[in-house]
Image (tube, rainbow, N blue to C red):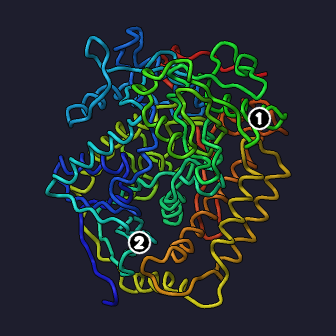
Amino acid sequence: MGDFKTITTDVLVIGAGGSGLRAAEQAVAEGANVTVVSKSLLGKAHTVMAEGGIAASLGDVDPKDNWEVHFMDTMVEGVYISDWRFAERLAKEAPDRVFELEEMGALFDRTPEKKIMQRAFGAHTYRRLCHVGDKTGLEIIRTLEDRILHSENVNVFDEIFITKLFEKDGKVTGALGIDLKKGTFTVFESKATIIATGGCGRIYEVTSNSWETTGDGLALAFNAGAEMMDMEMIQFHPTGMVWPPGVKGLLVTEGVRGEGGVLLNTKGERFMLKYSPEKKELDARDVVARSIYREITEGRGTEHGGVYLDISHKGSQFIMKKLPGMYEQFMDFAGVDITKEKMEVAPTVHYYMGGIKVDPNTGMSSVKGLFAIGEAATGVHGANRLGGNSLADLLVFGKTTGSNVAAYISSVNNSRIDSRDIESEIQRVKSFIKENAENPYKLTEELRKTMSENVGIVRDEEGLDKAIKKIKEIQSRIKDIGVSGGMVFNPGFLQCMELENMSQIAELLVIGAKMRKESRGAHYRKDYPKKDRNWLKNIVFTKNQNGIKTSFFIPPEMPDYLKKLLPEEKYD
């Protein structure tokens, strides 16, 4: 059968972050045999960068909080293009998922009354984020990883890169992966496949995302025929490190501002009083990011291209208790003692609201047998994600999707994958090993530079046209890229495969940004600076024989009991 081995499983989970592990845990609990594949090492997931907390309306600190207010905050932050069906489920179920996580062994900070401590966060009406200092995401991964490793019906394979999804009769039947440690191929035959690979932050030069986040799962799904939605919506977190260069973009948690940190320009002005006098540093992320961007571009930024974030006024004891990770991060990487000194920060690409369009009840994509969760899926966050909703998202929809997958596989059989399709894909992957080829790193840097310069916090038609033209040029050159050597621990070889995915997702992002001729949430067009009620809809892309098919999506009408919770959207 060629130079590959075959593993047969009920459920293949691609991605071992919080969403993938939560789905795997649930599917196993309901009787499924699960295989989890990770591009990196188990435990090294982007979930650990979600430091601030889990958004859940427990009401432990602010008793007036409830799911209805959380729903309103989510819809308003998404600028009314979130699918209300996702937002309602998220708001209603998040508290139970937090308690469930606690029962699994997660430890949360406590109030004096021994309730779960909740902190303030940007654009939340109440203090809502359940946290473990500034290491909440790490605690989620630790807890779920422990559960997975002690489950008999889960197999975990790390440092495996999935190159293709296989289909038969309109259904995904499995995938091909290459072991980056050994250079060997494995075919995973599955009844159902879950994409839980996160976003695509690495298509930009400055991002909080680690090296793995190159849009692989999104490209896999798109090439398998899945619908993609809200691809123009990528979030710039207001605060990433700017110095030294080696850590530029590394996340500075919103928890710093939630605990009382203030933003200052080089004149010592607390500039958010000017841009957002009521919410100040805790306004929506797009508002704070654009405010920082303006201060920098108008000449009131630091020598390294940032602004100052100061929490030293809260005192050493408070900071070391509430933000120990941030103290260590700045001390170790920048030599800055945040108990005494200001931090330098600037916006950094952080989270993709766009992704694979899935059914709100099942989590299945438009392709049978293919599911998606977490940052790889879309529908919850609309035009802008509310801080802390990412962890709520992965817990709520990780559980429901895992449960739905377990139900789905009960009536499905494994299908054998045609060996000719497997051999064809193996030869395609091997073709990147060649002499005198174009350097994949050079093309990757050209792509990142293009996206950063033309498709950033502020966009316009001219820049988007430049980006499209450059992306098309890069795609025409991808056939010539390659590296020498072998397939074992060859980062250049991996870069070749990643670049294909990155350029494809970048193209969808730019096409969506060019189509949406308005400003809404994280998508800001200086040539169309106002919201347009005609764009109260979502852009959907599907791959077909002629290239990219475009359509639009509007959710079913919202029921009256939810309508009454929302303030009327204002248009200029």
**What SS does tag 1 mark?**
loop
Q: Taking the image as drawn, is residue 314 in sight?
A: yes
Q: Mark 1 points at which residue?
A: 301
At horizontal 54% and vertical 58% (from top left) the residue drawn is 215
The dot on residue 429 is none
At horizontal 42% and vertical 82% (from top left) the residue drawn is 421
Q: From the viewer's perspective, tell me whether residue 571 is left or right of residue 7.
A: right
Q: Mark 2 points at which residue?
A: 166
Instruction: State which quarter of the image contains the N terminus.
Output: bottom left
Question: Can you give x and y, in whole percent of width and height, for residue 60 in the image?
Answer: 34, 14
Q: Which of 210 and 528 is in front in this view?
A: 210
At horizontal 75% and vertical 37% (from top left) the residue drawn is 302
Question: Can you give x and y, in whole percent of width and height, for residue 388 in the image?
Answer: 46, 31
Residue 88 found in image quarter: top left
The residue type indicated by label 1 comes to Gly
Tell me whether circle 1 and circle 2 mark residues in contact (CB < 8 Å). Answer: no
Question: Can you give x and y, in whole percent of width and height, for residue 219 in the image?
Answer: 53, 62
